[in-house]
Amino acid sequence: MRNLPIQTILSDSRKEKPNPETLVFGRSFTDHMFTAEYDEGIGWHSHRIVPYAPVTLDPAAIVFHYGQTVFEGLKAYRSSDGTVRLFRPEENMKRMNQSLDRLCMPKIDEEMALQALTELIQIEKDWIPTLKGTSLYIRPFVIANEAFLGVAPSKKYQFFIILSPVGSYYKEGIHPIKILVENEFVRAVKGGTGGAKTAGNYASGLKAQEVANERGLSQVLWLDGVERKYIEEVGSMNIFFKIDGEVVTPAINGSILEGITRKSILHLLHHWNIPVAERKVSIEEIQEAFEAGKLEEVFGTGTAAVISPVGELNWDGYKMVVNDGKTGPLARQLFNTLTNIQTGLAEDPFDWVLEL
Ligand code: COI
C-alpha cells in the first residue's frame, strides 16, 4: 500500500452512535470523512481526513447540471477478536477507475484510495457495528466541481469517502422480496453508462421504482433496452435464477453493473461444482421454467443487499411465486458462507478479506 502523507484533523466532538438493534441503511454517518482534490495540470492533492461536515459547492458546479460523478460501495466488519475486515476493497477501487474513465473523470491512485480508506476506518473503528446483519458501509465517490455551464469534462474534482453504520438494505431483511419486472422504462442500453456506477443510472430508475412501490413491490427488475426481453439487473443488485439444478445469471454485456458480490458468488458456485452459466436469459425463459415447475430459486446479490431472496416476480400482470415465497436453500447457503467469510466466522479460503 502507498504511504502518502494524509493530513488528519480530528473532530472535537463525537456524535452519538445509533442503536444497532434498529439500524437501517444509510441514515447515519460517522464523525470523520476523507477528501482530496484534483486540478487539471496538478493532479490529485490535499489528501486529508477531516470532521464529517456539509460541503460548499458553487451552484454552477458541473456535477449539479450534467451529473459527472461516480461512486462505490463496500463494507467493513469487526470480528469477535476486534479485527477490522474489509471485503475485496481493491476490486471496488479498480471498478471505480473503470467508472471514472467512462465518465471522462481523472483516475484515482488505487493504492492511495486504499490507504485513505484504511486510515479513515482505523479512526472510526468504534463505529463498526457487530450485531449480526450489521456492518459499516463505505461510500467512496468523486464529483466534478468546476463552476462551468458548458457541456465538457470538468477541470476540477473532489474525492470523498464517507462511512455509515448500516443494517439490512431492504426492510424485508433476509426475507424474500417482491419484484416488478419493468416493461415500460429502461435502465440502460449497450454503449450507455449502465456498466458504470454513476448517479444518472439510479436517478433514471426512480420512476419505475415508485410505480413498483405503489403496487406493494419493493424492487424493479430491468429488461434490456432494445428488445425488452432479456433480463439485466435489479439496479441495487445483480440477479441469479436456479432453474432445474443450474444457476443462471445474465452475462456482463456493457449495460449491467459488474457486481463484486456477483463475482464472489460465481466463484463460490464454481468451487462447489454447482452448474452455473453466465448468459443471456429472457423473461419468457423464466416464465416457461416457472410454468414447468423448474424455477427453483431467485436471488439478488450486491454489497448493500448481500444475498436477497426473491419470493415473487410480477411481469405484465403475470405473477410468479418462487419457492412458495420462502428463502431457498441455495440462497441461504450462499448468504451464510459469504457473511461468515466477511465477518471472520469462517476461513477465508480465497483471500478476499483485507484485515486491518
Ligand atoms: C451497493 O450495493 O453498494 C450499491 O451501490 C447499491 C446501492 C444503490 C445501495
Image (cartoon, rainbow, N blue to C red):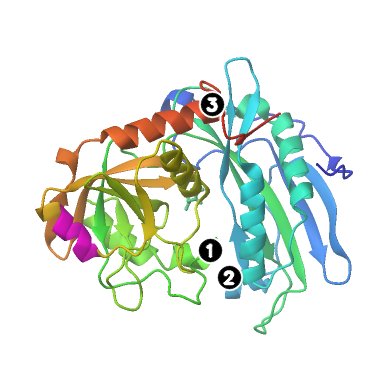
Would you place residue 332 above or below residue 36 in this image?
above
Q: Is residue 343 left or right of residue 316?
A: right
Residue 184, quarter of the rendered image? bottom left
- The residue at the point 21 percent across, 53 percent down is 313
Q: Range of the magenta residues?
A: 283-289
Marks 2 and 1 close (CB-CB < 8 Å): yes
Establish if 80 lies above or below 67.
above
Splitting the image into 4 quarters, where does residue 335 fall? top left
Q: Is mark 2 within 8 Å of ligand 1?
A: no
Inspect the image, locate mark 1, and give the three-letter code of the amino acid beneath it: Ala
Query: Which element type, helix, strand or loop, lies under badge 2?
Result: loop
Query: Could you tell whether 196 is left or right of 150 in the image?
Result: left
Q: Secondary structure at mark 1?
A: helix
List x then y, in percent, for residue 305.
42, 43
Nearer to the camera, 185 or 298: 298
Query: Is residue 89 one of those drawn in magenta?
Result: no
Rendered image quadrant of residue 175: top left
Q: Give how far across and how far down residue 146 sits, in percent.
A: 74, 72
- In this rendering, does residue 18 appear at all? no
- Residue 87 visible somewhere in the drawing: yes
Q: Which residue is mark 3?
A: 343
Query: Which residue is the site of mark 1?
Result: 199
Identify the residue under disc 2: 67
Q: Quadrant of the C terminus?
A: top right
